[in-house]
Amino acid sequence: MKEEKALLKIITDSAADVPKKEAEEYGIRVMPIPITVDGTTYRESVDFTSEEYYPMLLGASSIPTTAQITPMEFADAFREELAQGNREIICVTITAQGSGIYNAACLARKMVLEDLPQGEEAAIDIVDSAAYTYVYGHAVVKAAKAAKEGKDREEVLELLHRELTTWQVYFGLTNLDFAKKSGRITSTAAFVGELLGFRPLLTIHNGETDTIQKVRGDHKLIDAMVERFQKQAASDNRGFYIVHAQSDDLTKELRKRLEKATKRKCLGEYLIGASVTTNAGPTVFGVIVPVTEVI
C-alpha cells in the first residue's frame, strides 16, 4: 500500500479565535494561551468557550491576566508534528507588537531545528500576523484549507501574506473600563470619554492598536464603521467578516447596515475570545474590511 504524503501542518495560538469546527475540519493545531482569573489559571479555548468567558470577565474581582505560550510548549508541539511525519510547519502568531508569543515560537523553532539528527530535514516557518482575533484567524483557516488541498509551502506562505495584508479591521469599544484597567487607554482619557459619551473607533496599524476616531454614542460607531468601509474597501467585491463579543444588538445592526450600504456578503460572524476581550471588554465589536493594502 502506498504511503500517504503528510500534509503541511498549520499551527496558531488561541488569540486567532479560530472556531473549533474550523480547526478540526482543516487540521489546525491551536496552542492555548494561559489566562489567570482571580488566581486560577485556565487555557483559552480549552477550559472555557468564549461565551463562557464573558461572565467570568465581568465577575472577576480584578482584571484577568494573560501569559505567554512558552518556547518549550511550542518546541514540544513542533516535535510532535515532526514525529507524526509533518516535515513542514507554518506557525502563525498574534502580533509581536502586543505579545511575546511570536518570539517564543521563533526560539522554539531554533531549538528544534538545531536538535534534529544529522541528515534529517524539516522546515518551520514562524509568521507574525501583526493582528488580533479573526483578523488573522481567517488567514490561518485559508492557509490550512490550501495545505489540505495539496498546495506547497511557498504557495501557502504567499497566500498567508496576501490574506494578512489585504484586510483591515475597524472595531469599537462601548465600555472603557477594561481598556482603562489594562492600560490600553489612560484613566484620564477614559474618564473624559465616559463623561462626554465618547466611544473610540480603533484599527490595527503595524501590529499595534490605534484610536483613529472618537464618536459620541454607541450607534455612531456603526456610522463610522460603515463610512470607513465605503472609503477603504477594495473594489473587488469581496465580502466582509463581523467580529464581536456580547454586542449582539450592535452586531446585528452593523451587519444589516453594511449589507445594505455595500451590497456585499457577510462571510461570517466570529466571536472575539478571552485574549482580546480581557483588554477590550466584553462589548467590543467590529468589521474586517477587504482592502487593497493595510494602511
Image: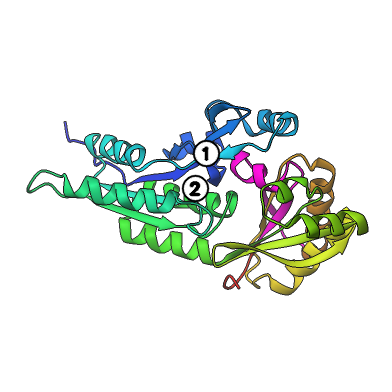
Q: Residue furthest left?
A: 118
Residue at the image position 51 percent from the left and 40 percent from the top: 14
In the rendered image, residue 277 lying in the magenta stretch gets the answer yes
Tell me which label, 2 or 1, sits earlier in the chain. Answer: 1
User: Quick one: which residue is furthest to the front in this view?
Assistant: 188
* Alpha carbon separation for disc pair 2 and 1: 7 Å
Where is residue 127? Give x, y as percent: 40, 57
Q: Quadrant of the N terminus?
A: top left
List the residue tagged with mark 1. Answer: 22
Residue drawn 74% across the image and 74% down it: 231
Q: How many marks?
A: 2
* Kind of residue sitting beneath label 1: Glu
Say left or right for 12 vs 45. left
- For numbered disc 2, what is the local secondary structure? helix
Q: Which residue is drawn at 68% across and 70% down?
A: 233
- Judge left or right: residue 294 versus residue 213: left
Amino acid type, callout 2: Val
Q: Residue 141 carries which label?
A: 2
In the rendered view, tell whether residue 168 sits above or below residue 195. Answer: below
Image location of residue 89, percent across then percent down: 31, 48
How far from the left and from the top, in percent, is residue 176? 78, 50
Tag 2 and tag 1, C-beta contact below 8 Å: yes
Q: Give the range drawn in magenta.
A: 263-288
Q: In which quarter of the image is the C terminus?
A: bottom right
Q: Residues within 10 Å of mark 1 (few under 14, many from 20)?
A: some
Q: Quadrant of residue 258?
A: bottom right
The verdict on residue 7 being magenta is no
Observer-nearest of 110 and 225: 110
Pointer 2: residues within 10 angstroms few (<14), some, or many (20+)?
many
Q: Is residue 251 visible?
A: yes
